[in-house]
Image: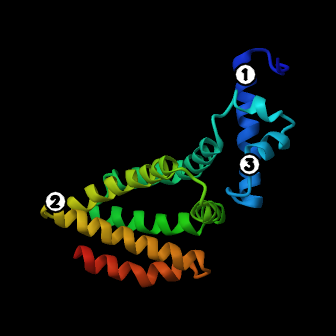
């Protein structure tokens, strides 16, 4: 029976889950996801590996928790911008600049790089991460649709193209280009695409 280090079992479980999360993130950053085992995570906090499964089902659960924690503020801010009362063109420009600022953040870029290099993630884990990204795309699509009447398939295509431009800009920023310069070069393409 594991030693309970808190006043209640619930608090103990929460404390252990938080410690496992923090240790896993540190190890993912240091070694990468593929080179970090659950045994490594358990050892980092002084927990027997067989006790680990009381607190977390598998390594992928820790990865999802990390990525959601990294993405949540960005996603919330994106949805706030895109669902605001600003004029549609202003919402899209503000969102676009915010996305580039987010990808320029070193911790976000590091998390993306680490997850993209991982080959051991389950398809379901990648799908959960993808769903989080797609929630922003829905809000962007709505903002694009509000610019002027367009057929649904055109809105979907324009949304995909804007997202592709953001992804391309992210790649440039992650390779060392300055975010403001990338934004200045990329925004005119968005203006042209959306006929702003």
The image quadrant where one finds the N terminus is: top right
The image quadrant where one finds the C terminus is: bottom left
Q: Give whichever of discs 3 and 2 has the lower sequence position.
A: 3
| Residue count near mark 2 (Cα–Cα under 10 Å), binned few <14, some 14–19, many ≥20 | few
The residues bearing labels 2 and 1 have C-alpha atoms spaced at a distance of 49 Å
The correct choice, above or below, for 53 with respect to 123 in the image is: above
Q: Which residue is mark 2?
A: 152
* Residue 41 picture quarter: top right
* Coordinates of residue 150 in the picture (x, y in percent): 13, 64
* Residues tagged 2 and 1 counted as in contact (Cβ below 8 A): no
On residue 11, which mark appears? 1
The residues bearing labels 1 and 3 have C-alpha atoms spaced at a distance of 25 Å
Q: Secondary structure at mark 1?
A: helix
Q: Give whichever of discs 1 and 3 has the lower sequence position.
A: 1
The residues bearing labels 3 and 2 have C-alpha atoms spaced at a distance of 45 Å
Q: Which residue is mark 3?
A: 37
Residue drawn 70% across and 31% down?
A: 53
* Residues tagged 3 and 2 counted as in contact (Cβ below 8 A): no
Residue drawn 34% across and 65% down?
A: 92
* Residue 58 picture quarter: top right
Tell whether 8 sits left or right of 87: right
Residue drawn 48% across and 47% down?
A: 124
Tell whether 142 sits left or right of 149: right
Q: Secondary structure at mark 2?
A: helix
* Coordinates of residue 155 in the picture (x, y in percent): 21, 63
Q: Nearer the viewer, residue 194 or 172?
A: 172
């Amino acid at each position: 029976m594991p030693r309970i280090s808190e006043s209640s079992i619930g608090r103990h479980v929460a404390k252990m889950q938080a410690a496992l999360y923090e240790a896993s993130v540190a190890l993912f950053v240091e070694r990468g996801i593929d080179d970090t085992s659950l045994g490594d995570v358990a050892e980092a906090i002084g927990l027997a590996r067989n006790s680990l499964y009381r607190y977390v089902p598998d390594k992928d659960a820790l990865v999802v928790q990390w990525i959601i924690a990294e993405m949540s503020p960005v996603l919330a801010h994106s949805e706030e911008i895109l669902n605001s009362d600003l004029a549609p063109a202003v919402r899209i420009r503000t969102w676009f600049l915010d996305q580039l600022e987010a990808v320029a953040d070193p911790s976000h870029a590091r998390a993306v790089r680490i997850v993209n290099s991982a080959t051991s993630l389950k398809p379901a884990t990648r799908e959960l991460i993808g769903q989080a990204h797609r929630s922003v795309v829905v809000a962007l699509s709505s903002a694009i649709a509000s610019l002027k009447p367009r057929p649904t398939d055109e809105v979907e295509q324009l949304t995909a193209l804007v997202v592709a431009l953001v992804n391309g800009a992210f790649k440039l920023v992650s390779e060392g280009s300055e975010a403001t310069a990338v934004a200045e070069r990329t925004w005119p393409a968005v203006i042209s695409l959306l006929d702003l």
